[in-house]
Image: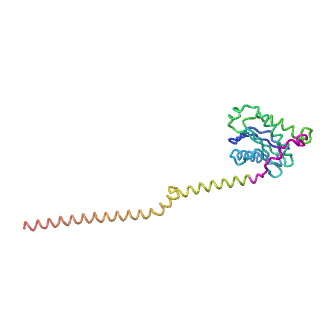
Amino acid sequence: MVKLTMVGRVRDGVPLAQGIRYVNEENDDVLGYKQQAEFILKEISRGALSSPKMAIQMHHHSFIYLIENGVCYMTLCDSLYPRKLAIHYLQDLQREFSKFDDALLNSLVKPYSFPKFDNIISNIRKRYIDTRTQVNLYKLNDSRSQTDLDIVTCSISEIFERRRKITDMVERSICNANSSSIWSFSFVKEIGLKWTPVVVTFGVVLVLLWASFLLFDISLSHHNQFVILYNNRKLFH
């Protein structure tokens, strides 16, 4: 069963539309599924997921997405739901979405700011609820269609782990760059703590030496004046 659908722009990872969420509110984490779908869309926009078709396994569900002309069409299905049928569903969405003007779609800034497409998603989804209808059985049994043979498969945990490693690597690179910089704050702080006492002590010694020389000069000047006065007195007497 198709439980959640999202249409998003690949270049910036902005979700444009979503269908009605057919999720059991009691047994399913509605917000969690939506956040994971948004995370997958962001990973696609970063280039971390380059395959145009992918099935991402998660517990008893699968996210299946299809990328066409810079737009990602994604759905959350039960793990037993046929992938081939899910791809047909996404292809139907793509055909309807391609009828809209590209300039309009590129001008959208806010997430989920294209609600007009939500109703279209709901109408198309109704065709795929029952996998045993004649039309759907024909799609499943059509040997000419190879839509399910080139779908890359991975798990959501693999994508999370890959993102974590990339984030850790970037953080380490930033830390190494900061620590290697001679003008980094930590380096300056260390130099200050180590050499400030030495500089202060040296300055105090210089001041004391200067003061002692100054006092010596004053004392010598007074002594010379006293000798001159004494000699003058002897001359007059």
Residue 122 sits above or below residue 60 on the image: above
Residue 232 on image: x %, y %: 11, 65
Is residue 144 on the magenta stretch?
Answer: yes
Residue 231 sits above or below residue 155 on the image: below
Q: Quadrant of residue 70?
A: top right
Pick the front one: 55 or 234: 55
Q: Quadrant of residue 45?
A: top right
Report whether 131 appears left or right of 234.
right
Which residue is the extreme one toward the left? 237
Pick the front one: 102 or 40: 102
Is residue 188 on the magenta stretch?
Answer: no
Report whether 221 appears left or right of 159.
left
Pick the front one: 121 or 222: 121
Report whether 206 appears left or right of 132.
left
Report whether 167 appears left or right of 97.
left
Residue 64 visible in image: yes
Residue 138 on image: x %, y %: 90, 40
Residue 158 sits above or below residue 68 on the image: below
Pick the front one: 203 or 12: 12
Numbered range of the magenta stretch: 137-158
Residue 140 on image: x %, y %: 89, 43
Residue at 8 percent of width and 67 percent of height: 235
Task: Tell me the quadrant of the picture where the N terminus can be found.
Answer: top right
Task: Tell me the quadrant of the picture where the C terminus can be found.
Answer: bottom left
